Image: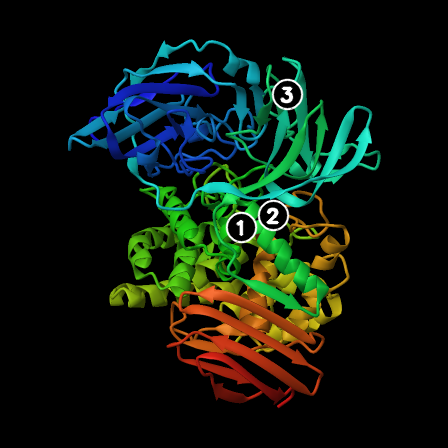
């Protein structure tokens, strides 16, 4: 590896192809370690190697000037570049072999969308590879990037992650003109193997013609997806086919780009609209963007073509769950959440939206972490993303960015930055990976110290200068819940977690210190925000009392009573995306499953029915649909379909579900529900049906896992495999 050099091509080419020729005598096998910045595709002897897309996975590649961001930063972060390893023995041939690496700008040279500021890492795309091939004579041939390679232009004449691609098939029909590459210094970054899953084409949809306007045809994919349209076309050289993508129509039949970013403009003044242009050559060509994905339900196409297909693309993460019930709204919520979370998984990053920003916001990712782990196999994806969170922490101050990898964006220290504590802790509790706690612990300690340094009298009151210090976000009505209250509650929750984590790792003195600090913060919150006359915190606005219950401040129960009384009357969520999850969590954790169900299924604006009734197939950023229509953050209460309504839990203090407690909380109006998930201990399923008097249960648990069932004050020991029984509903 130490001999391989980084090689680059001139910046004026958006997608160069680097070629290396080498000879083999009766090859018997071979492997290659390879990467490229931004994205790369490997070909050997004209054949594509693997089905990976958008590789390597995005990381904080190398140092850049963060002072030019919309919210300037001067942090010193950790930089990392991932390479992939491929077995290429089946691609080799006797005699001359051709290794080609095609590059695309990806995130590395993203200079069109500037809403978060100038985030581009560099202007020259570059590659690195190191290969070993075995021959039948027993000799090994090593081929590595060394500057003797040549490059040519590809048929991708324009590529931008947000804007799309222009592909000219005529270029590939011309005689290739090769030029020398140049060697460049190795990036100031850690180079290590990518172990997380890559993006892939997961499934294919046949779109349906929706309507036509003149020569333009508009198609419906049937659901909001993340991916691309594959077009097969041929005929007259130079003939163009253009596509544009959106989630909505205007009444006149034109695409409405607002929810997919169309209100913003690119650097050259164009509106931020996802589009592709394909230019035909002399023969039939299959066109599809290689280094950009789109997010859409509907698309417009102008120009003649032979075939169309919609390819759904995301990180290759399996769905490991199911849910069905008598509530169409809960069923929609589960389906929409799974689709939304998958649409927002690219490069092993749980993003906020797959079109407008595409960033790994720590707030969105940490709020939905438990829902994601119940619904999807997130072990590899979250393991990588946790490393991104650690890498984007300032090595001196301990500040944690609002996005990971660090790509700018607004947020706050609590619901965003506390992801450095919350996500690894939830990962440990779900998967039982103690090593991740050991790796993250020093970063967690630095984060707590950062929050302390940005506090006054025990309350978190600021973050970085010229940046945001949000509390909650994206509520139906203007936010009134105090940011310092929200952030201080998150600090208190993180301190409680740190007491337990420090004890788990054997840092007993740290554990005691965190417990003492928690007492100080607790006292400060009560002193500043508790009204002894009413029993509420921060006036009870937008779920404020739920925060108090969540962090154990409600000693006499008045805040909880006020909370229940308020939301029974209100019958919708007036909370932001953070408060919504905390509210449902508190209600289901305190015997108010009926109220949680009422809020989640309410027909009023401020719940999920409005999205469903307006044809949404993914979860919106706002309950009223003002912004993005593909945001997973309001899907976080999906976890409570599993841990509350179905009751799939583990005893307090346990991890990796080595012991199971099935304790369903059945809302009166939910006549049946059935669901399953695959936990680290194995597959678990729960179903029930009830008539208001008797409940029939069917519960399946893995072999070798101690499990008990609790309902209506009764407890049963569950046997391995399927258990069927009935109980009185109000026992």
Question: Mark 1 or mark 3, which is nearer the start of the sequence?
Answer: 3
Q: Does dot 2 land on a helix, a strand or a loop?
A: loop
The residue closer to the viewer here, 458 or 586, is 586
Tell me the residue that label 3 is attached to. Answer: 234
Q: Which residue is mark 1?
A: 364
Mark 1 or mark 2, which has the lower sequence index?
Answer: 1
Task: Name the quadrant containing residue 729.
Answer: bottom right
Q: Quadrant of the N terminus?
A: top left
Crowding near the residue tagged with mark 1, few <14, some 14–19, many ≥20 C-alpha atoms within 10 Å: many
x then y, percent, for residue 173: 52, 13
Above or below: residue 578 compared with residue 232? below
Residue occupying image coordinates x 70% and y 70% = 326
Residue 59 shows which numbered tag? none
Eye-nearest disc, 3 or 2: 3
Placement of 400 over or under 520, stated as above or below: above
Give the distance between the C-alpha atoms of the residues marked 1 and 2, in whole angstroms: 8 Å
Check contact, mark 1 vs mark 2: CB within 8 A. Answer: yes
- Residue 656 screen position, x and y as percent: 39, 67
Q: Are marks 3 and 2 in contact (CB under 8 Å)?
A: no
Of the residues tagged 1 and 2, which is closer to the observer? 2
- Image quarter where the C terminus lies is bottom right
By what rule are the colours in the image chosen?
rainbow
Sequence-wise first label, 3 or 2: 3
- Say left or right for 131 vs 390: left
Q: Verify CB contact (< 8 Å) between mark 3 and mark 1.
A: no
**348 left or right of 356 in image:** left
Q: Nearer the viewer, residue 538 or 633?
A: 633
Q: Secondary structure at mark 1?
A: helix
- Can residue 531 be spotted in the picture? no
């Amino acid at each position: 590896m130490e001999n391989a050099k980084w090689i680059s091509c001139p910046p004026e080419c958006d997608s160069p192809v680097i070629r290396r020729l080498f000879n083999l005598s009766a090859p018997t096998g071979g492997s290659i370690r390879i990467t490229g910045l931004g994205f790369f595709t490997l070909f050997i002897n004209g054949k594509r190697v693997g089905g990976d897309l958008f590789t390597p996975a995005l990381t904080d590649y190398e140092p850049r000037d963060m002072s030019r961001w919309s919210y300037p930063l001067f942090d010193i972060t950790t930089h990392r570049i991932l390479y992939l390893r491929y077995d290429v023995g089946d691609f080799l041939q006797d005699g001359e072999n051709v290794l080609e690496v095609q590059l695309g700008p990806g995130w590395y040279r993203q200079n069109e969308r500037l809403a978060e500021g100038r985030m581009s890492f560099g202007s020259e795309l570059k590659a690195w590879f190191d290969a070993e091939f075995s021959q039948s004579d027993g000799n090994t041939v090593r081929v590595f990037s060394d500057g003797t390679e040549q490059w040519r232009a590809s048929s991708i004449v324009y590529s931008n992650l947000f804007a799309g691609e222009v592909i000219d098939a005529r270029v590939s029909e011309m005689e290739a003109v090769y030029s020398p590459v140049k060697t460049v210094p190795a990036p100031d970054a850690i180079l290590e193997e990518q172990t997380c899953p890559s993006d892939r084409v997961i499934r294919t949809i046949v779109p349906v013609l929706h309507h036509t306007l003149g020569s333009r045809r508009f198609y419906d994919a049937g659901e909001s997806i993340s991916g691309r349209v594959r077009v097969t076309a041929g005929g007259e050289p130079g003939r163009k086919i253009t596509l544009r993508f959106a989630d909505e129509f205007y009444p006149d039949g034109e695409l409405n780009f607002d929810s997919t970013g169309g209100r913003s403009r690119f650097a050259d003044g164009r509106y931020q609209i996802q589009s592709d242009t394909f230019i035909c050559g002399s023969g039939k060509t299959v066109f599809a963007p290689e280094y950009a994905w789109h997010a859409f339900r509907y698309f417009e196409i102008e120009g003649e073509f032979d075939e169309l297909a919609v390819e759904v693309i995301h990180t290759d993460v399996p769905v490991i769950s199911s849910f069905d019930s008598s509530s169409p709204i809960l069923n929609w919520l589960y389906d929409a959440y799974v689709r939304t979370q998958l649409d927002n998984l690219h490069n092993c990053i749980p993003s906020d939206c797959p079109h407008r920003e595409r960033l790994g916001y720590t707030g969105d990712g940490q709020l939905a972490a438990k829902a994601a782990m119940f619904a999807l196999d997130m072990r590899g994806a979250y393991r990588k993303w946790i490393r991104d969170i650690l890498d984007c922490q300032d090595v001196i101050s301990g500040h944690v960015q609002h996005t990971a990898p660090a790509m700018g964006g607004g947020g706050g220290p609590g619901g965003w930055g506390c992801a450095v504590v919350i996500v690894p802790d939830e990962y440990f509790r779900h998967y039982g990976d103690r090593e991740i706690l050991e790796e993250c612990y020093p970063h967690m300690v630095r984060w707590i110290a950062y929050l302390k340094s940005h506090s006054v009298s025990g309350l978190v009151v600021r973050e970085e200068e010229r940046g945001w210090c949000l509390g909650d976000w994206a509520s139906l009505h203007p936010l009134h819940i105090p940011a310092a209250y929200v952030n201080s509650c998150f600090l208190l929750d993180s301190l409680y977690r740190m007491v337990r984590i420090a004890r788990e790792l054997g840092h007993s003195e740290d554990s005691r210190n965190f417990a003492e600090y928690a007492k100080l913060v607790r006292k400060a919150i009560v002193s500043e925000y508790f009204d002894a006359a009413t029993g509420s915190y921060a006036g009870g606005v937008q779920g404020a009392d739920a925060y108090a219950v969540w962090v154990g401040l409600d000693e006499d129960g008045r805040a909880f009573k006020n909370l229940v009384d308020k939301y029974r009357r209100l019958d919708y969520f007036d909370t932001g995306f953070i408060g919504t999850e905390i509210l449902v969590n508190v209600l289901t954790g305190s015997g108010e499953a009926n109220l949680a169900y009422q809020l989640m299924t309410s027909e009023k604006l401020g719940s999920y029915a409005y999205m469903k009734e307006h044809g949404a197939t993914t979860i919106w950023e706002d309950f009223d649909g003002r912004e993005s229509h593909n945001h997973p953050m309001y899907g976080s209460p999906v976890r409570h379909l599993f841990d509350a309504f179905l009751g799939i839990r583990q005893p307090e203090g346990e991890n990796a579900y080595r012991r199971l407690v099935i304790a369903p909380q059945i809302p009166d109006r939910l006549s049946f529900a059935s669901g399953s998930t695959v936990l680290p201990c194995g597959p678990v399923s729960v179903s029930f049906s009830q008539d208001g008097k008797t409940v029939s249960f069917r519960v399946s648990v893995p072999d070798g896992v101690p499990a008990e069932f609790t309902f209506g004050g009764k407890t049963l020991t569950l046997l391995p495999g399927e258990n069927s029984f009935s109980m009185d509903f109000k026992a």
